[in-house]
Image: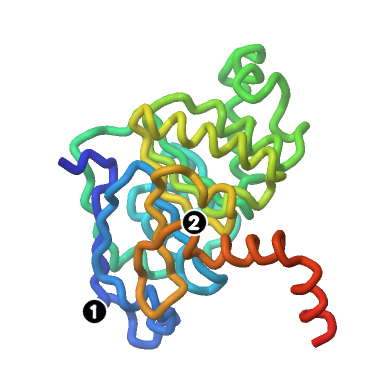
Amino acid sequence: MNDKFIRSIEIDWNRVEEDSYLHQITALRQMDFLEFQKNITIFVGENGTGKSTLLEAIATSYGFNPEGGTLNYRFSTFDDVSSLKDSLRLTKGYRRAKSNYFFRAESFFNVASKAEDYRDFTPKEIFYSRYGGKSLHEQSHGESFLAYFQSFDEAGLYLMDEPEAALSPQRQLTLLLQIVKLAEAGAQFIIASHSPILLGIPEADIISFDSEEIKRCSYEDTESYQVMEMFINHREALLSRLLDG
């Protein structure tokens, strides 16, 4: 039985305007149905292949604020949501998520600011204890995101768009451990990422957007892994070829 919070998605392309740029995203345009089979699903692909566009549509269709946060967050600094949301249908599972969160690297500052707004309604010692003992805005981008995410400890629904953007490799490993811990407890993750570290999460369902159609693939078949492996193992030859060329 599929017990995921989001079991599957369907796209009705007849509801997308004929002149929409969405029709030009090759792999995405070939998709009309996707089932989520594991607790951790990772979208991978080159820039412009549609992975973040699809993740945003899933998030907003579920009820998240386009700029991120929990389902309770409602704010807007720039309206740039694609029309894919209106063509997407989610099939939800029977379980109700105990917690929820949509992370976008480029708008996390705004999410942190909204979190700070709740400080007036929470005892100071309790509020700061959630985030490493100090204000989110007194920490670096990477520190504040990791502190915010580590405050979640329940089997919830977590959608994450390139969470590695602000994190060092060591902090990415910390995030990996937290993701695995929550997934083992029943949480569901849908992540768009380029990170060879996060893509290496054991048992993750990796879905590639890099060919003419969206398809599942192994860790070793992702371009993120192949480029990193080539650079690490053949750095001098690769750089020589690139720079001489």
The location of residue 20, given as percent across then percent down, is 40, 82
Determine whether 13 is above or below 171 in the image.
below
Q: Amino acid at mark 2?
A: Ala
Render colour scheme: rainbow
**25 displayed left or right of 34:** right
Q: Secondary structure at mark 1?
A: helix
The location of residue 159, given as percent across then percent down, is 44, 47
Task: Residue at 48% x, 36% y: name it.
Answer: 179
- Give the alpha-carbon distance from disc 1 to disc 2, as whole Å: 26 Å
Q: Amino acid at mark 1?
A: Asn
Label 2 crowding class (10 Å Cα cut-off): few <14, some 14-19, many 20+?
many
**114 displayed left or right of 234:** left
Q: Nearer the viewer, mark 1 or mark 2?
A: 2
The location of residue 89, given as percent across then percent down, is 24, 59
Label 1 crowding class (10 Å Cα cut-off): few <14, some 14-19, many 20+?
few
In terms of depth relative to the viewer, which is nearer, 47 or 82?
47
Q: Which quarter of the figure is the N terminus placed in? A: top left
Task: Residue at 27% x, 49% y: name it.
Answer: 37
Q: Is residue 75 visible?
A: no
Report the residue marked by disc 1: 14
Image quadrant in which you'd find residue 18: bottom left
Report the residue marked by disc 2: 192
The location of residue 166, given as percent across then percent down, is 69, 48
Q: Secondary structure at mark 2?
A: strand
Image quadrant in which you'd find residue 230: bottom right
In terms of depth relative to the viewer, which is nearer, 215 or 32?
215
Question: Residue 198, labelled with which disc?
Answer: none
**29 displayed left or right of 179:** left
Task: Residue at 63% x, 66% y: name it.
Answer: 227
Q: Which quarter of the figure is the C terminus placed in? A: bottom right
